[in-house]
Amino acid sequence: MCELKAIVCGANGAMGQLLLQRLGDRATGLVSADGENGVPKTFEEMGAVDANVVIDFSHHSAAQAVTEYAKKTGCALVMCTTGHTPEEKAMIEDAARTVPVFYSGNMSLGIAVLCRLAKQAAQNFPDADIEIVEVHHTRKVDAPSGTARMLFEAVKEVRPEAEAHCGRAGEGKREKKEIGIASLRMGNVVGIHEVHIATPSQTLTLRHEAHDRGMFADGAIDAAAFLIGKKPGLYNMQDLL
């Protein structure tokens, strides 16, 4: 297998810094929109580097620049950002026709297992009410989290009629096809995700709590290594499992 040689997009961010610590000399290129610490602001400014994967921990608005670079150079692409618009998601899907792209709302292996368990529970309790609760630090800008959306989509695979209901306010009882998603923002919480499966007689609660942001960097590196040698296509954490 070829050696991993990665370009880190968003290198000056908190996750970018964690990723660089773990990659060491396997990081062969850096890009950061702020241009601080002498890091190039754009791929054009960075110039030619020896790399086979781009790992993007920047911002969803960088999707066009990142996908165009991957298609131009043939680098595989690991998208670790969330909150993409429909137009940006279309760019990612288009890139996957040319290069292998790993796209996930969460880079944690534990979350991938949680998605699988949530799907299984929804299948085993077809009449249960399902609610998703996610908690993050006060600096997180998107809600619901990409992970909460992943959990909803996992359940929707076995409940195609399901509709996401983000937040509750006002009057009106819960509809059976709803899957509620509640978002809390407080303190310095790395990430907590819960799936509640409730019947009239019992409740099953599935929970994942992130203790260290480093696990997301580890997951991104695992995803990057997984992509090396893969055919063009869209991959996710379930493929890695």
Image (tube, grey):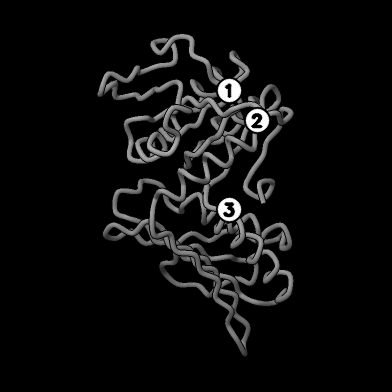
**Side of 87 relative to 154 (left or right):** left
Look at mark 1 in the image and give the residue it sits on. 52
The image position of residue 23, as x and y in percent, is 45, 34
**Residues tagged 1 and 2 counted as in contact (Cβ below 8 A):** yes
Check the picture and name the quadrant holding the N terminus: top right
**Side of 184 relative to 91 (left or right):** left
Q: Residue at x 55, y 58 (%)?
A: 110
Under mark 2, the amino acid is: Ile
Of labels 1 and 2, earlier in sequence is 1
The secondary structure type at the circle numbered 1 is loop
Alpha-carbon span between mark 3 and mark 2: 24 Å
Of labels 3 and 2, earlier in sequence is 3
Q: Residue furthest bottom?
A: 201
Look at mark 2 in the image and give the residue it sits on. 228
The quarter of the displayed image where residue 76 is located: top right
Under mark 1, the amino acid is: Asn
Q: Is residue 37 visible?
A: yes
Compare residues 62 and 57 and report the one nearer the observer.
57
Crowd rating for badge 3 (residues with CA inside 10 Å; few <14, some 14–19, many 20+): some
The image position of residue 154, as x and y in percent, is 65, 57
Crowd rating for badge 2 (residues with CA inside 10 Å; few <14, some 14–19, many 20+): some
The secondary structure type at the circle numbered 3 is helix
Q: Residue at x 57, y 44 (%)?
A: 104
Under mark 3, the amino acid is: Met
Question: Residue 150 — which label?
Answer: 3
Compare residues 69 and 216 and report the one nearer the observer.
216
Q: Residue at x 67, y 71 (%)?
A: 121
Alpha-carbon span between mark 1 and mark 2: 8 Å
Question: Residue 132 — which label?
Answer: none
